[in-house]
């Protein structure tokens, strides 16, 4: 007689009910399944457990005496790469979609958890288990909104899939790793992207309405290494808006509270992470965390051109100056914002130093957010690597 695991008796939470993490919920999707049974241990916002999960995944936790590991997590290697033939309509050059397609085509996995959009709304996420290359391609490009990727977990068990690739951002992957051994899989591969400053669908609309000249025609945007937000519109035109000109007062509350209290920007529990911010403009930044990640990357090596990582400039003064701007919602006049963007782009941090700039700016902001709004959670919720990063800066007295 097989004994049914306890979680199968649990019931997914009703769609409109308050989630166990309350306002800190990132809508990762776990609670939309019977795996809600494990939410107290698994939720990234209820139980911060990087040390355990890094050890479970990579065989060790990150070395806090090594600054590169503090910033970028456990890794064997980082490289700069781009596809020699980019996938049209991908967020960058489509390395993520290409790895997923290669893994499916070569029979490494039977399905890929990824996120398409709904037919009515290009930014409304629709998580799926893709079984064909076409379904993976239909998930290309960011849905820059909170996305319940783990809501398909019950379907995995029901469909009998044994070898699976999951594509996701940090909060989704933390919860996934925590229930990994309950999924009945023979092999789980995790392909991550970095993630920061995500929003609800309503928050996204506010951001677009406040920032873009034509919110309804935006098909893609990214906060780029040249200190500007780049919007791509339906007609193929690009619009750029300097970071320092963003209406920070209007936008102060637009980011989801989960993202204001997240310290897993670099997706520390994925096997392989594909982002952009540690690479020069137009290139992607790949972090190989373990042997599984290395094998996944090797599968598409012949589709990539690569170059060594660069790291130039010094971020620290710029981060220190950005702390009050973030904190008090200072908005510069547009001419000053453009000028500041040009100056910083010329002399400012590049490559990995830019990635550190972005991590420092977000971690200091988020540390202050948690301290002000969830003081009782501060000590346990902020991981040691983040405390070390934040301790390099003078923070306002709260
Ligand atoms: P593509 O081939 O276009 O594939 C994109 C994949 O992302 C798809 O498989 C899709 O399933 C998945 N996806 C889309 N939206 C979501 C979502 N909301 N949640 C989970 N998975 C999703 N990189 C940085 O270096 N710095 C950042 O600050 C940064 N912020 C990001 C914020 C968000 C919300 C997201 C989703 C990604 C972010 N990234 C960031 C990653 C980066 O923008 C690209 O997604 C990454 O470099 C892959 O590009 P690609 O062309 O290879 O992806
Ligand atoms: Fe549940 Fe995920 Fe929300 Fe946590 S973040 S409460 S695990 S849906």
Image (cartoon, helix red, strand yellow):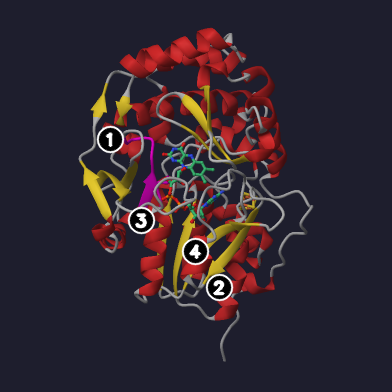
| Residue found at the very far bottom of the displayed protein | 1
On whether ligand 1 comes within 8 Å of the CB at mark 4, the answer is yes
**Separation of marks 3 and 2 at Cα, in angstroms:** 20 Å
Whichever of callouts 3 and 4 sits on the residue coming sooner in the sequence is 4
For residue 332: magenta? Answer: no
**Separation of marks 4 and 2 at Cα, in angstroms:** 16 Å
> Is the C terminus in the top left, top right, bottom left or bottom right quadrant?
top right
Q: Circles 4 and 2: CB distance less than 8 Å?
A: no
For label 2, the crowd category at 10 Å Cα-Cα, with few meaning under 14, some 14 to 19 and many 20 or more, is some
Badge 1 is on which residue? 68
Label drawn at residue 156: 2
Residue drawn at x 42%, y 28% as measured from the top left: 358
Q: Circles 3 and 1: CB distance less than 8 Å?
A: no
Helix, strand or loop at label 1? It is: helix
Badge 3 is on which residue? 271
Magenta segment, which residues?
267-279
Q: Position of residue 296 (x, y in %)?
A: 31, 62
For label 3, the crowd category at 10 Å Cα-Cα, with few meaning under 14, some 14 to 19 and many 20 or more, is many
Badge 4 is on which residue? 136
Q: Position of residue 3 (x, y in %)?
A: 58, 83
**Residue 236 visible within the image:** yes
Helix, strand or loop at label 2? It is: helix
């Amino acid at each position: 007689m097989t004994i049914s695991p306890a979680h199968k008796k649990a019931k997914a939470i009703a769609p409109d009910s308050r989630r166990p993490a309350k306002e800190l919920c990132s809508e990762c999707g776990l609670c939309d399944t019977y795996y809600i049974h494990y939410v107290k241990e698994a939720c990234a916002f209820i139980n911060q457990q990087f040390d355990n999960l890094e050890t479970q995944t990579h065989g060790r936790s990150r070395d806090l005496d090594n600054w590169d590991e503090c910033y970028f997590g456990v890794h064997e290697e980082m490289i700069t790469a781009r596809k020699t033939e980019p996938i049209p309509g991908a967020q960058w050059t489509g390395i993520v979609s290409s790895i997923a397609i290669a893994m499916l085509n070569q029979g490494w996995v039977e399905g890929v958890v990824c996120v398409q959009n709904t037919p009515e709304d290009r930014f409304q996420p629709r998580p799926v288990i893709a079984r064909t290359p076409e379904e993976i391609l239909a998930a290309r490009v960011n849905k820059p909104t909170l996305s319940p990727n783990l809501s398909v977990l019950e379907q995995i068990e029901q469909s009998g899939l044994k070898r699976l690739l999951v594509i996701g951002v940090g909060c989704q992957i933390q919860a996934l790793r925590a229930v990994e051994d309950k999924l009945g899989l023979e092999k789980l591969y995790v392909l991550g992207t970095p993630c920061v400053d995500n929003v609800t669908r309503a928050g996204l609309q506010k951001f677009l309405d406040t920032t873009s000249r034509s919110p309804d025609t935006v098909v893609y945007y990214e906060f780029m290494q040249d200190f500007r937000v780049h919007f791509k519109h339906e007609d193929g035109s690009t619009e750029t808006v300097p970071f320092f000109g963003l209406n920070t007062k209007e936008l102060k509350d637009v980011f989801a509270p989960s993202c204001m209290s997240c310290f897993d920007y670099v997706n520390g529990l994925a096997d392989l992470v594909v982002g952009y911010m540690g690479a020069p403009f137009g290139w992607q930044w790949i972090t190989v965390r373990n042997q599984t990640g290395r094998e996944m990357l090797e599968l598409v090596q012949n589709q990539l051109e690569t170059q060594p990582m660069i790291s130039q400039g010094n971020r620290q003064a710029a981060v220190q100056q950005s702390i009050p701007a973030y904190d008090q919602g200072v908005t510069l006049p547009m001419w000053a914002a453009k000028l500041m963007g040009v100056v910083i782009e010329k002399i400012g941090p590049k490559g990995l130093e830019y990635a550190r700039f972005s991590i420092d700016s977000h971690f200091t902001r988020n540390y202050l957010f948690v301290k002000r709004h969830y003081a009782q959670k501060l000590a346990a919720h902020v991981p040691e690597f983040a405390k070390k990063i934040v301790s390099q800066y003078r923070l306002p007295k709260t």
